[in-house]
Amino acid sequence: MALVGPRTLNDVDLRRFPDVEGPGLVAIDAADRLTVDEAAALLDEVAPTRSGTVVIDDAYGALTLSLLDVIGGDGEIRVHQDLLTGQRALIANAERLGVTGFTSVPFSPDAVSGARLVVMRLPRSLDRLAEVAALIASHADPGVVVVAGGRIKHMTPRMNDVLREYFDRLDVTHARQKSRVLIARNSSTDRPIPTWPHTEFHPDLDLTVAAHGGVFAGTGVDIGTRFLLANLPPQLPLPRLDPASPTGGAGSRRGSESGTKVVDLGCGNGTVSAWFARHHRDAQIVAVDRSALAVASTRATAVANGVDGQVDVHWADGAEPVPDGSADIVLLNPPFHSDAALSTGIAQHLFAEAARVLRPGGKLWCVWNSHLRYRPALRRIVGPTRQIARNPKFTVTASTREA
């Protein structure tokens, strides 16, 4: 296969949308460019077709769209992206550039089955890297070559160790523009391959937490979540008036807690959903997250705690599956990073989603790092906001949706 250079993409070609956009938030960086260049240099050795090529965790399409320039053959490049916003950005960028030749796939053995070339963005989580490496080693072609790039400030020597557990050869490229690429070859499955999700029992919460690699807090319970759970009210609010009732009056109220609708916005490993379901057996919880691995983890946590009948989990951006004005309670521990960059854009997007889905009088219970001073934004976007609790690091607030 003759080597043809990939197209040079930049932020004019690629957008992050529908992910948060703003100063310092880029759709392509030096690590993407170096990863593509290193993959292109291996084409004569690997001789992949599009159907034999897999891209994993492409942020916004830079890897996929560049590789389509240099890899021919029948079929389509398989692309798995954990974040739904990343998948949508890739599709939108491809449409804008008039590019085809890829298909989005879930994280499963089929995603890498028979692959000869896997190009990926290095995750910051060692567990995520281990889970991806195990999947590739178990189901890709035995001669697969894995090209994994990242920013040096987010890379550690332990990443090399993880890849060496699953591959017999590992090469480390020279650095360029503060980025580096790891190239793994010759998959090795001589030892037992661990399975995911992993689980951990937390006796203080009487809760088992399940998590796939890379999910926030893993199988643990982060201290912000613990602070939120410790300050939630023991009783749910009175249920809404049933608009289908002929009278619509007090006699139409449902029984205590019956049918109360709760939204776990950004459900992560499912700790909040499972804990709330265990303590409020009549509540119905809609758990949403833009991370596919978080969605899988929340489902597994719900099953592990016997509350899967109460928890309906969706892969979504914000609270997309939830109708306007339909929720009694929203529970939220918002992130304040977008990739490696500090950003309040994600939190404000989630505040707006909470305001949209809450009924008048419904409440958003939120925990946030106190230094972020979210209270004015909560008051402006959702409604009157009062502080419930505060410690040296976190603040818990309750915001009431006004009519």
Image (cartoon, helix red, strand yellow):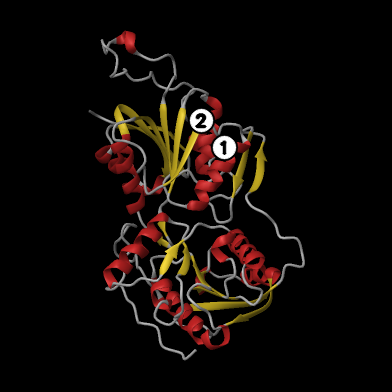
Q: Please state the horizontal and vertical placement of residue 321, each as a whole percent of the image.
A: 37, 41
Q: Secondary structure at mark 1?
A: helix
Position of 331 with respect to 247 (left or right) is right
The first of marks 1 and 2 along the sequence is 1
Residue 240 is drawn in which quadrant? Answer: top left
Out of 79 and 124, give the one closest to the viewer.
79
Q: Is residue 72 something one can see in this rendering?
A: yes
Residue 356 is drawn in which quadrant? Answer: top left
Count residues near mark 2 (Cα–Cα under 10 Å), then give few for <14, some for 14-19, many for 20+. many
Q: Label 2 near label 1: C-beta < 8 Å?
A: yes
Q: Please state the horizontal and vertical placement of residue 310, each as a whole percent of the image.
A: 51, 30
Out of 283 and 105, give the one closest to the viewer.
105
Q: Is residue 204 above or below residue 223?
A: above
Residue drawn 49% across the image and 89% down it: 1
Give the position of the C terminus as an image quadrant: top left
Q: Is residue 342 something one can see in this rendering?
A: no
Position of 377 with respect to 66 (left or right) is left
Q: Secondary structure at mark 2?
A: loop
Out of 168 and 27, give the one closest to the viewer.
168
Which numbered tag is attached to residue 310?
Answer: 2
Count residues near mark 1 (Cα–Cα under 10 Å), then give few for <14, some for 14-19, many for 20+. many
Kind of residue at disc 2: Gln
Residue drawn 35% across the image and 63% down it: 91
Which numbered tag is attached to residue 302?
Answer: 1
Q: Please state the horizontal and vertical placement of residue 175, each as a whole percent of the image.
A: 51, 83
Kind of residue at disc 1: Ala
